[in-house]
Amino acid sequence: MAKVVYNGLVPTPSLLGFTVPVTAALGGFFGLLAGQATGIGAGLGIVSGAIAGAIIAYVLATMLPYKTGRWATIGVIGIIGLLTGGAMGLVVGLCAGAILGWCAYWLHLGKYRRSLPPYATTGQVLWHNTFKFICGAILFFLVAPIVTIIPLSFNAQDFFTFTPEMLSLDPAGYSLKHYQDFFTNQDWLRPMKNSLIIAPFATIISVTLGTLAAIGLSQSHVPFRRAIMAILISPMIVPLIISATGMFFFYSQMGLWMEDTFGISKSLSGYIKVILAHAALGIPFVIITVTATLVGFDNSLTRAAANMGATPTVTFFRVQMPLILPGVISGALFAFITSFDEVVVVLFVGAAAQKTLPWQMFTGLREQISPTILAVATILVCVSIMLLATLEILRRRSERLRGMSPT
């Protein structure tokens, strides 16, 4: 078989000496998993998977083009999975077929060298791809526990594990009853209401004070800037339990003072204490994001505004704020997430009347095992994903405003 040149530089690797053995090894790994799942035994599963992987690699490399071969592999392995494992076997087979088809072409076409120079040695190629594999494994290690929660939240039973009905993809094993319980049970709606009250107010305070602090610390004439910055971002560095203990002693006395001096109720003073405590935790995030935005700010614009007769207030709202707004919004989102997800400080500072959603989830894990926690966690994950996507959009917009290329 004639060698094919990939990108005009790298010849395709040996089919029988490289592509087929490696794909066979990957097929053997999938066969091991399938053998244990179906009960045919690990040994037979490895042998069957290795033979299937070798056949797939040879057929795809010699007979089928890229797209046709990949779809054919997905279909064949999916059908085999359906016949051996039902609906769940079909899903697993489709995923395994997609991976095997991709691997066979990735090896045969030499795509594993695509981002490397043609003179790269075998060791350099091996390390390059091993490093990417390690990064992927770390990503999987971080994301897998979060992804596992999502299907569990649809469990029809009051369990924290996958039931046989769920594993077989039986519709009877899935239900929305945990989501229904969350949206109808006052034990969950009340903490949700408290979180939606506390987090926005804490965010407003964090953004206001954090933005002013960042602008002040960005001025070169401010003395001891580094020391002040270190003090302001210390809540991010100091262990949270220590911060919570200090806040407990400080805000408890402040709450008593507000009740005695202004005659406000204990419930209102409790909300004020929790809001201020969460604001103290959110301010460092605002300072860091706004300071990063101010790095590329052109101070000549403020001087030009002053020369045109603009007051400092007008200059701030008309000149500075439009340019640093992406950083301010990013800091606000970080502060909101910090307040909305925080549980340690509210346990120290708040009372039962200020029970937040994370507090209720913590109680549900310790005192009463409620599967509704899984539904709440899934909702929070979705909200966090949307907020992170917003942060990325704002980051790119900020770079465009500063004349940088988004990366």
Image (cartoon, grey):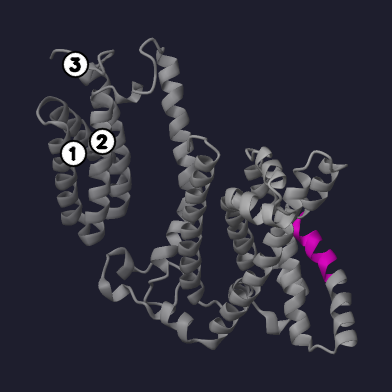
- Please tell me which residue lies in front, 367 or 119: 119
Identify the residue at horizontal 25%, vertical 38% (top origin).
Answer: 100
What span is in magenta?
238-248
Q: Quadrant of the N terminus?
A: top left
- Count neighbours of disc 2 (C-alpha within 10 A) and say few if under 14, some if 14 to 19, many if 20 or more: some
Q: Amino acid at mark 2?
A: Trp
- Count neighbours of disc 1 (C-alpha within 10 A) and say few if under 14, some if 14 to 19, many if 20 or more: many
How far is the residue under mark 3 from the one under mark 2? 18 Å
Q: Which residue is mark 1?
A: 70
Q: Which residue is mark 3?
A: 4
Which residue in the rendered view is the most extreme toward the top?
A: 119
How far is the residue under mark 2 from the one under mark 1? 7 Å
Q: Is residue 338 left or right of residue 90?
A: right
The disc at residue 102 is 2
Identify the residue at horizontal 31%, vertical 73% (top origin).
Answer: 173
Q: Amino acid at mark 1?
A: Arg
Point out residue 252 in the picture as x, y percentages from the top left corner.
85, 76
Q: Are marks 2 and 1 in contact (CB under 8 Å)?
A: yes
